[in-house]
Amino acid sequence: MEQDDTVKRFQMVELVHKSAKQRAEEAQPHDCRELQQAAFERGRQAGIAEGRAQCHAQVEEEIKKTLRLANQIGRARVIALEEQERDIVEVALAISKKILLRECENDKELVVRQVRQVLGLLHDKTLVTLKVHPQDFKILEPLQHTLRPEWADGDHLALEAFDDVDPGGCLVEQAGLLFDARLTQQLALLASEFGLEAPRL
C-alpha cells in the first residue's frame, strides 16, 4: 500500500501548451525602467554629440570671421599710421619752410654761411659763378673776396644777382657743372626722402 500513497501524492503536470494570453497573465509584469533609462541615455548622448558638432562648426565659422576682421583692422591700422606719418612729415616740412624763410629775413649772415659752406665743397680753383637772390647779392658783394679766402689771389669767383634763386640759397656753376643749393631744392630733396612733394616757398 505504500506504493499507492506515492502515486496519490504525485501530481500530474499537464503537457498542453498555454495560450499567449494565459502566459501573459501568469508572467509577472516586466520592469521597463531600465530600458527607458538606457534609451534616454543613448538619446542624450546622441543629442550631445550632434550639439557639439553644430557648435564646433559655428565656432569654426566665428573664428574665421574674427580672423578676417582682425586682418581688416590690422590693414586699416597700417594705412591710418602711414597717413598720419605722412601728415606729420608734411607738417614738419611746412614748419621747416616757415622757419627757414623767417631766418633768411632776420639773419643776414645766414646766406654768408650757406655760401661759404657750398664753396667749401668745391676743390678746384677754376672759375666759379655764384648766383644768388638780389637781396643776398647786396650782402655778399662786399664780402666776395672773403667768402673763400684761398681764392682771394685771383678772379676765381663771379657773383651774380638772379631772381630765380630764393633768399638764403644759391646756384653754383663750375666747369659746366651746376650745383643747386636753393632752399626750394633742399626742401624738395628732403621731401623726396619721405616720398612727398616739396612745400612751395
Image (tube, rainbow, N blue to C red):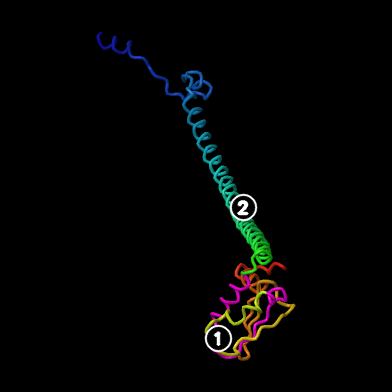
The outermost residue toward the left is 2
Residue 89 location, x and y as percent?
63, 61
Tag 2–tag 1 contact (CB < 8 Å): no
Residue 20 location, x and y as percent?
52, 25
* The image quarter in which residue 160 lies: bottom right
Q: What stretch is highlighted in magenta?
A: 110-138
Q: Amino acid type of disc 2?
A: Ile
Up/down of 51 relative to 126, above or below: above
The crowd level at tag 2 (other Cα within 10 Å; few <14, some 14-19, many 20+) is few
Q: Is residue 125 magenta?
A: yes
Q: Does the magenta stretch include residue 97?
A: no
Question: In percent of the image, x 63 and y 77: which residue is there?
Answer: 181
Question: In percent of the image, x 53 and y 22: which residue is there?
Answer: 21
The crowd level at tag 1 (other Cα within 10 Å; few <14, some 14-19, many 20+) is some
Q: How many labels does the image show?
A: 2
The quadrant the C terminus occupies is bottom right
The quadrant the N terminus occupies is top left
Residue ID for mark 1? 151
